[in-house]
Image: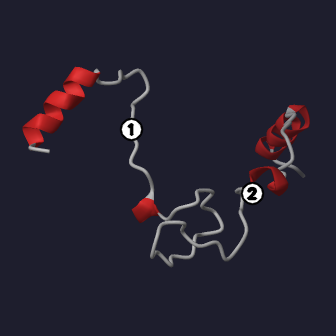
């Protein structure tokens, strides 16, 4: 004989409807690039990762300012003032 608790959970399970999407691994694979690529910087023999889409290794990448979302770019005057303060 079923207990009242088991009857309650089986009634609940019959009414429970779950839906979702199937996990598709092809959609989430990271983009890869050809193997054996070498950094294009002069005298650098670093072999680039197959996940690095750039033509240079991390050490020879062009430095770009990092901007936070909602931030603003410094004006040219501010950049020149900061460089002058560094003595460059």
Secondary structure of residue under mark 1: loop
Point out residue 64 in the picture as x, y percentages from the top left corner. 40, 42
Q: In which quadrant will I find the C terminus?
A: top left
Q: Nearer the viewer, residue 16 or 53?
A: 53
> Disc 1 and disc 2: Cα gap in Å?
26 Å
From the viewer's perspective, tell me whether residue 13 is left or right of residue 80: right
Q: Position of residue 87 (x, y in %)?
A: 8, 44
Residue under pointer 1: 66
Binning the other alpha carbons within 10 Å of mark 2 as few (below 14), some (14 to 19) or many (20 upward) gives few
Question: Dot 2: what SS?
Answer: loop
- The answer to which quarter of the image holds residue 68 is top left
Q: Position of residue 50 (x, y in %)?
A: 66, 68
Along the polypeptide, which appears first: circle 1 or circle 2? 2
| Side (left or right) of 21 relative to 78 | right
Depth check, front residue: 27 or 53: 53
Residue located beneath label 2 in the image: 29
Given contact means CB atoms under 8 Å apart, are the residues at marks 1 and 2 in contact? no
Picture coordinates of residue 75, whole percent (x, y): 28, 20
Identify which residue is drawn at 70% across, 57% down: 30
- Does 10 sit above or below residue 29? above
Identify the residue shown where x is 75% and y is 52%.
Answer: 28
Figure label count: 2
The residue lying at 63 percent from left, 57 percent from top is 53
Residue at 50 percent across and 79 percent down: it is: 45
């Amino acid at each position: 004989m079923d207990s009242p608790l088991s009857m309650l959970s089986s009634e609940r399970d019959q009414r429970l409807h779950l839906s979702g999407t199937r996990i598709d691994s092809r959609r989430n694979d990271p983009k890869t690039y050809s193997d054996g690529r070498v950094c294009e910087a002069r005298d650098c023999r670093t072999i680039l990762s197959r996940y690095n889409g750039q033509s240079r290794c991390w050490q020879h990448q062009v430095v770009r300012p990092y901007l936070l979302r909602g931030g603003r770019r410094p004006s040219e005057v501010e950049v020149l003032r900061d460089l002058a303060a560094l003595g460059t």
